[in-house]
Structures are given as C-alpha cells and as structure tokens.
Image: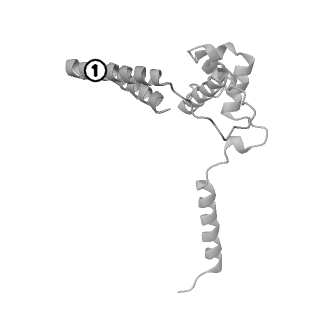
C-alpha cells in the first residue's frame, strides 16, 4: 500500500484544524485593558457606597445589565461574584484596628513569692470547704439542670486553691 504524500499533508492539516476548534478561546480577563468582574463591582461600590449597606443587590444587577446590552439576564457567575465582593468589602468596613503593641519591657528574673498570712490561709480554706459543700448540694439536687452553676462553682473552688498555693 502506498501513501500519497499529499494525503498525509491533508490529514495533518485537518488534525491541526480540529485541535484549533477544540481549544477554548482566551479568557476575557487575560486581554489587556479588560477589567475583571470583581473590579467592575468594586468600582460601582466606590461610586455608590450606600449600595454596600443595602440588603438587595437589584440596583447593582440592573446596572450590570445596563452596562452589558448583549445580555438579557444576569448569569449566576456574575451574581456570585457580586456577593463575594460585597461580602469582602463589608468585612473590611467592620474590621477595627487592633490594640497597639506595647514595647518590650525588661522582666525581672527574681520575683519574690507572695506571702499569704496565716489568717488569710484559714479564711481561704474555710471558703474552699463551703464552695465544696455548695458543689455537692448542686450535684445532688439536679446535676444536668444546674450544670452551668456547677461549672462556676468548680472554677471558683479552683481559683481559691490557686490562691492557697501562692
């Protein structure tokens, strides 16, 4: 079987044509001078900051349709992009600057232990016992219903114990 050289070239050209037809066109964002969807909506929010506070996006969607005369309805992708941009811009408005950081102060390496007087120790031990009694009573009454009270009592008792250990 002989292969005609012309047929080989024709087949090669046809394959190149099919590949070119299957390749998707370049994204509109990749063209120089074209603005992104997010950039379009950011510009609209700069022009009309009150739209950022509104719950409805209808004014923005109407404006988009007006600026894109070839479109009859707003695609879902555009609506989602609008929601994301609006959310990000609202979040930036909510952010408050953090507390200024304090300059590093030298720390003392020799800290004297806090001396608790014997009188205070007795009072703290008595307080711990009373909190324990309240804790036992709360557990016996209704452990589930008083779970938050029990949690508070446990934290109070733990803090008293810490004071005793100082």
Instruction: Write the residue at 57% across / 26% down.
Output: 83
Residue 19 visible in the current orientation: yes
Give the residue furthest to the left: 140
Left or right: where does residue 107 sit relative to residue 131?
right
Q: Could you say which quadrant of the image residue 12 lies in?
A: bottom right
Q: Return the x and y of residue 153 as percentages of the image width and height.
A: 36, 22
- Look at the picture and state if 18 lies above or below 141: below
Instruction: Write the residue at 63% across / 21% down.
Output: 94
Give the residue furthest to the bottom: 1
Q: Return the x and y of residue 119 as percentages of the image width and height.
A: 45, 21
Instruction: Write the residue at 40% across / 29% down.
Output: 158
Alpha-carbon neighbours of circle 1 within 10 Å: few (<14), some, or many (≥20)?
Answer: few
Residue toward you, 117 or 42:
117
Residue toward you, 126 or 35:
126
Residue toward you, 163 or 57:
163
Residue 144 visible in the current orientation: no
In this picture the colour scheme is: one colour
Left or right: where does residue 160 sit relative to residue 86?
left
């Amino acid at each position: 079987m002989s292969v005609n050289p012309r047929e080989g070239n024709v087949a090669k050209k046809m394959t190149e044509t099919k590949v070119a037809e299957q390749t998707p066109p370049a994204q509109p964002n990749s063209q120089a001078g074209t603005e992104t969807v997010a950039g379009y909506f950011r510009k609209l929010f700069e022009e009309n900051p009150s739209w950022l506070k509104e719950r409805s996006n209808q004014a923005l969607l109407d404006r988009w349709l007006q600026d894109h005369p070839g479109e009859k309805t707003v695609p879902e992708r555009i609506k989602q992009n609008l929601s994301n941009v609006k959310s990000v811009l609202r979040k930036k408005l909510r952010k408050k600057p953090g507390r200024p950081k304090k300059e590093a102060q030298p720390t003392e390496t020799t800290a004297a232990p806090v001396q608790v007087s014997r009188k205070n120790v007795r009072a703290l031990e008595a307080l711990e016992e009373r909190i324990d009694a309240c804790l036992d009573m709360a557990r016996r009454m209704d452990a589930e219903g008083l779970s938050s009270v029990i949690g508070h009592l446990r934290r109070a008792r733990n803090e008293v114990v810490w004071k005793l250990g100082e």
